Structure formats: structure tokens, C-alpha cells
Amino acid sequence: MRLQEWAAQPDFSYRHELQEGDFVVWDNSGTMHRVVPYPEDSGRTMHRTTIHGEERISGSYALTD
């Protein structure tokens, strides 16, 4: 739980207030996200796209021991 609390600090958080015409994309492999409940008749549509395969790690993003 301590890691989740640390990661959810305001300095590391983004909250999006949806407006008509918005298009929001995030990468689940590196993002912690959640949804705030919304009315079913709000017109909001969610599409999920999944890419199968292995994530490439290179350059400054490489993890080291």
C-alpha cells in the first residue's frame, strides 16, 4: 500500500475532466488508473485496444540491477 500512496501523490497525478470531443489514451503497462463513476446515459464510450507481444526496453528506459 505504501507504493500506491507514494505513486498517487499530486505531483505524479493527472485528472482529466472529460469534455465533448475528448480522446484520451494511456499505456496500461506503465500507468495506474481508475475511473470515477459516471451516469450510463452520459454518452461516454470506452474502446479498449490490446497489442500482443513483448515490450521492447532500450536506451534510457532500460532497467538495470
Image (cartoon, rainbow, N blue to C red):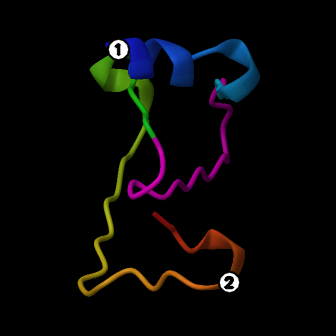
Mark seen at residue 63: none
Mark seen at residue 59: 2
| Residue 63: % across, % down | 51, 67
Q: Amino acid at mark 1?
A: Pro
Q: Residue at x 24, y 83 (%)?
A: 52
Circle 1 SS class: loop
Quarter location, residue 62: bottom right
Quarter location, residue 55: bottom left
Which sits in the foreground, 16 or 30?
30
Which sits in the foreground, 46 or 58?
58
Give the left or right position of residue 23, taking residue 39 as reference.
right
| Residue 43: % across, % down | 43, 34
**Residue bearing mark 1:** 37
Quadrant holding the N terminus: top left
| Residue 30: % across, % down | 47, 53
Give the left or right position of residue 53, taking residue 62 as reference.
left
Identify the magenta region. Answer: 17-31
Which sits in the foreground, 59 or 29?
59
Quadrant holding the C terminus: bottom left
Q: Amino acid at mark 2?
A: Gly
